[in-house]
Image: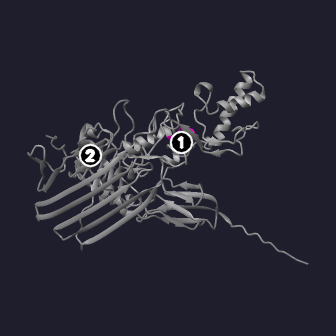
Amino acid sequence: MLLATFSLASAQTIDIKGTVIDENGEPVIGASVMIKGTLKGDITDVSGRFSLGGVKTTDKLAVSCIGMIPVEVDPQAEMRITLKTDHEQLDEVLVVAFGQQTRSSFTGSAAVVKSETLEKKQLTNVMSGLQGQVAGLQMINNSGSPTATPSMAIRGFSSINAGTSPLIIVDGSPYDGGWNNLNPNDVENITVLKDAASNALYGARGANGVVMITTKKGKSEKATITFDSRWSVNSRATIDYDYVKDPAQYYEMHWSALYNYYMRDRGMTPYEAHRQANANLGGATADGGLGYLTYTVPDGEYLIGTNGRMNPHATKGRRIYYNGKVYTAAPDSWLDEAFRHSLRQEYNLNLTGGTEKLSFYGSIGYLDNQGIVYNSDFERATVRLKADYQAKDWLKVGANMNYAHSTSDDVGDGSGTSLFGITNTMAPIYPVYLRDGDGNIMTDENGKMYDYGSGELGGLNRPVLSRNNPLQENALNTDRDYRQQSDPHGLCRRHPARRPEDHRQRHGHKRRVTLHVHPAGILRLWQDRLPKRLHLQVQQPCLCPELPADR
């Protein structure tokens, strides 16, 4: 005889009440008292009191308030909970228009994203690091290109035609260069000023908000060398609709459409409709055909049987004799041929150090980001040198230089007859390449030979998107952009015209050297190559006006 004994134990529930106070014994108003892991809780009143019913003795209470360190406590019938001030949060330094302020003394609306947050992400440009980090900041990625930068809106959309891009300030000066020219590894923090008061210094330019980027600087400590390397894989993450990807199923569905047409509209018998649908399946568009038949069936048999299914004896690939040559028409997956799993690799070497009077920061960065389609790559090399020297109590001399060289390839957007547009709409029965009689891809001096659907493959004509193959156009007509920038604020930028040849390339080279000297004000010296002129301008401290226009 087997005897089993079960015992059930349930946690005791109690009603609790208490008070939340600070270090000085003053009540904390608006503190959140929640049962951990649930949505049940209470908010303290003007006396700092709260009450909760039906709390299990095994539960934990999570108590928190803005500007104070959160705590977890065990529930009791009568409670007195003390919260301590979060001095680290209140002493957080904000970079604002007129210099720096602590969080506790700042009355405007701003958000800070520190370098620790940026280092956790794989970033090509600095602005992408703000996604999901700043309340109220709207960012939209319009492209999956390695060089794409998101559009930003800090203060909403106030006009149909006006832009929403904020003013970008880098180390105290307006920046209108490419965001990809800044190495995220060199950024110390990013401050987003959102309200009107915090960006009043910049006038109308700051109407859409201000993003202030502060780069890293040396510290008064022993020299430190840091090397960082990162690898990741890029792949197509688009979730496709459920559509026909199998060429056999595509032929079956098209045969069914022809069969029903001949039965219903032409009055044919089932046998006649079956035979006629097979005859016109790979025929001309005028006869309802698809233009291509990429399967071979034994003599005397049909590709599609009377049950509407593919002939089990059919094999992929059909030999075609045309103008004395033998070709093979075989179906290809356009998506598989266009997209790839690519490698992203990044390396950064930093040197920082200094003394009581001298601080130095230097970095060398290299990024090779291959796109998810061929010839959509981005390569960048950056060098930054930043030094400050306290020569006198009233004189501080500093230099801040950034050099960036980048090479990028562009394949266009995803609309119309572009690579993305065609590969997502092309039926799975159509070949990408030209193949010989043995099924091998044919080549010429340009590499692989492609089918444009206009008679190249055994005289076959594609009824849709004829005379078009974006895969070869992408391989040969590279839209390449070379950029060099040696201005730390990125104010020299040129958009060169394209060359009118098959291998189109865009070249833009412009160099500028900037020297910063900081006594009572800021003294800047610019030397531009075209033409060679010296521009000298003395400015008030931290007023950050626009630099002289390009000559």
Q: Which mark is residue 177?
A: 2
- Locate residue 465, reporting x and y percent: 50, 33
175 displayed left or right of 291: left
Q: Helix, strand or loop at disc 2?
A: loop
The residue where tag 1 is placed is 326
Query: Image point 78% across, 25% down: which residue?
Result: 269
Residue furthest to the bottom in view is: 1
Do callouts 1 and 2 mark residues in contact (Cβ within 8 Å)?
no
Q: Work out how far the residue at label 1 is from the one at label 2, CA to CA, in angstroms.
A: 55 Å
Whether residue 483 is situated above or below residue 121 in the rendered picture: above
Whether residue 423 is situated above or below residue 6 in the rendered picture: above
* First reached walking from the N terminus: tag 1 or tag 2: 2
| Amino acid bearing label 2 | Gly
Whether residue 370 is situated above or below residue 474 in the rendered picture: below
- Locate residue 26, reporting x and y percent: 43, 61
Q: Quadrant of the C terminus?
A: top left
In the depicted view, which residue is nearer to us: 416 or 391?
A: 416
Q: Is residue 310 magenta?
A: no
Q: Tell me if residue 104 can be seen.
A: no
Q: Residues within 10 Å of mark 2 (few under 14, many from 20)?
A: some
Q: Nearer the viewer, mark 1 or mark 2?
A: 1
Whether residue 116 is situated above or below residue 313 in the rendered picture: below
- Locate residue 245, reporting x and y percent: 60, 43
Q: Residues within 10 Å of mark 1 (few under 14, many from 20)?
A: some
Residue extent of the magenta highlight: 423-427
Q: Tell me if residue 127 can be seen.
A: yes
Q: Quadrant of the N terminus?
A: bottom right
Quarter of the figure with residue 250: top right
- Locate residue 244, reporting x and y percent: 62, 41
Q: Helix, strand or loop at disc 1?
A: strand
Magenta: predominant secondary structure element? loop
Q: Which mark is residue 412?
A: none
